[in-house]
Image (cartoon, rainbow, N blue to C red):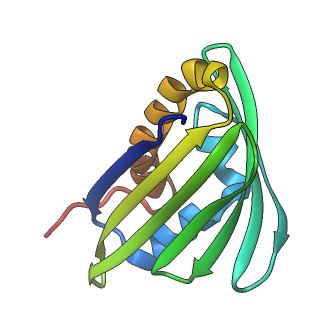
């Protein structure tokens, strides 16, 4: 049995849940601000779901994976594996409004790799990437919406 890896992060930000949801749902822009993302594309999209591919290039390692993203606008994005180097991948973005200009962004990801060799090389990389995601999106919010402070 391969190890299941879990990453949970949460951050309170001075941006609305709609602003943060839109950034997380804009997969096509990931390669513009995530340093480890060498490409990103939405392969299919409708109001309730998107199928997205992300290409990872980090410290000489290259891989890609595709997820099915179930969308609950401004509140949640649920991710599940379509294909990639994983035997399992599930994740959930939560966007909890605190008021009109602040929200709590939470990300919970569970993953297991398809082989011990892939796990040995990719687990530290993917754990690092998942752990830094919310901070990267906070930086992107500042780029897109301007710097904000809590009142």
Residue 104 lies in quadrant? bottom left
Q: Position of residue 38 (x, y in %)?
A: 73, 33
Vertically, is 122 above or below 97? above
Which is nearer the eye, 30 or 56? 56
Q: Is residue 148 left or right of residue 114?
A: left
Residue closest to the far front: 1
Quarter placement of the C terminus: bottom left
| Residue at far left of view | 151
Measuring from the top left, give residue 107's x and y in whole percent.
41, 58
Locate residue 22: give its quadrant.
Answer: bottom right
Percent coordinates x, y for residue 90 in the rendering: 55, 58
> How many numbered circles are shown?
0
Which residue is depicted at the point 28% across and 66% down? 14
Viewer-closest of 128 and 20: 128
**Whether residue 133 is situated above or below residue 44 in the rendered picture:** above
What residue sits 65% from the left and 63% below the top? 26
For the N terminus, the image quarter is: top right
Q: Left or right of 85: which side holds 116?
A: left
Q: Residue placed at 54% from the left, 34% from the top?
A: 2
Which image quadrant is residue 114 in? Answer: top right
**Left or right: 3, with 55 as reference point:** left
Farthest top residue? 60
Q: Nearer the viewer, residue 149 or 133?
A: 133
Question: Where residue 49 sits in the image (x, y, percent)?
Answer: 72, 77
At 29% from the left and 61% from the top, the residue drawn is 148
């Amino acid at each position: 049995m391969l190890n299941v890896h879990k990453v949970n992060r949460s951050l309170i930000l001075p941006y609305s849940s709609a602003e943060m949801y839109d950034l997380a749902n804009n997969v096509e822009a990931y390669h513009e601000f995530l340093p480890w993302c060498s490409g990103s594309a939405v392969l299919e999209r409708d109001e309730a779901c998107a199928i997205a591919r992300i290409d990872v290039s980090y410290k000489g390692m290259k891989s890609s994976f595709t997820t099915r993203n179930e969308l609950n606008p401004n509140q949640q994005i649920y991710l599940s594996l379509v294909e990639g180097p994983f035997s399992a991948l599930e994740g959930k973005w939560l966007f909890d409004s605190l008021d009109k200009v602040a929200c709590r962004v939470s990300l919970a990801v569970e993953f297991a790799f398809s082989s011990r060799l892939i796990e040995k090389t990719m687990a530290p990389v993917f754990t690092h990437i998942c752990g830094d995601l919310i901070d990267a999106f906070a930086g992107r919010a500042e780029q897109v919406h301007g710097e904000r402070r809590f009142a």
